[in-house]
């Protein structure tokens, strides 16, 4: 059985974990939005094709986590909190 104070001690770790994930997500979202805007304003078939390819690549990054985030301590911290 865990004590309540031990749970309270986890809060700073959880906050830092969420900050790390949020930072990654913000960068990914900004890249997708920029690629979308570029695709929407592209002129001509070649430019449009290139911009849409960029958008597809950026969207693909939304569907996969970078290896350094997948295998790092923060995800372990969140997993441990869920099992408590």
Image (spheres, rainbow, N blue to C red):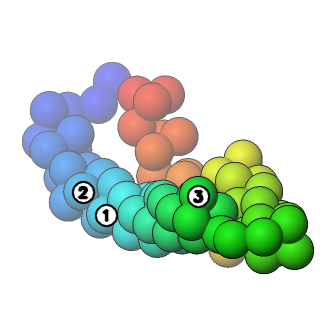
Q: Disc 2 designates what residue?
A: 15
Mark toward the viewer: 3 or 1: 3
Lower sequence index among marks 2 and 3: 2
Q: From mark 3 to mark 1, how far is it between C-alphas?
A: 31 Å
Q: Disc 1 designates what residue?
A: 19
Looking at the rendered image, the quarter that the N terminus falls into is top left
Give the residue displayed 20% in from the left and 33% down from the top: 3
| Position of residue 75 measured from the top left corner of the image (x, y, whole percent) | 54, 53
Give the residue displayed 72% in from the left and 47% down from the top: 63
| Position of residue 4 measured from the top left corner of the image (x, y, whole percent) | 14, 32
**Direction from residue 47 to residue 72 in the image, left or right:** left
Q: Disc 3 designates what residue?
A: 40
**Direction from residue 20 to residue 74 in the image, left or right:** right
Splitting the image into 4 quarters, where does residue 42 fall?
A: bottom right
Q: Contact, CB < 8 Å: mark 2 with mark 3?
A: no
**Direction from residue 83 to residue 71 in the image, left or right:** right
Give the residue displayed 14% in from the left and 44% down from the top: 8
Observer-nearest residue: 63 or 52?
52
């Amino acid at each position: 059985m865990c004590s309540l104070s031990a749970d309270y001690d986890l809060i700073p770790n959880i906050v830092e974990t969420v900050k790390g994930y949020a930072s990654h997500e913000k960068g990914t979202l900004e890249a997708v939005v920029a690629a979308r805007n570029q695709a929407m304003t592209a002129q001509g078939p070649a430019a449009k094709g290139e911009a849409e390819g960029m958008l597809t690549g950026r969207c693909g990054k939304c569907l996969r986590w970078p290896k350094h985030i997948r295998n790092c301590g923060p995800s372990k911290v969140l997993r441990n909190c869920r099992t408590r």
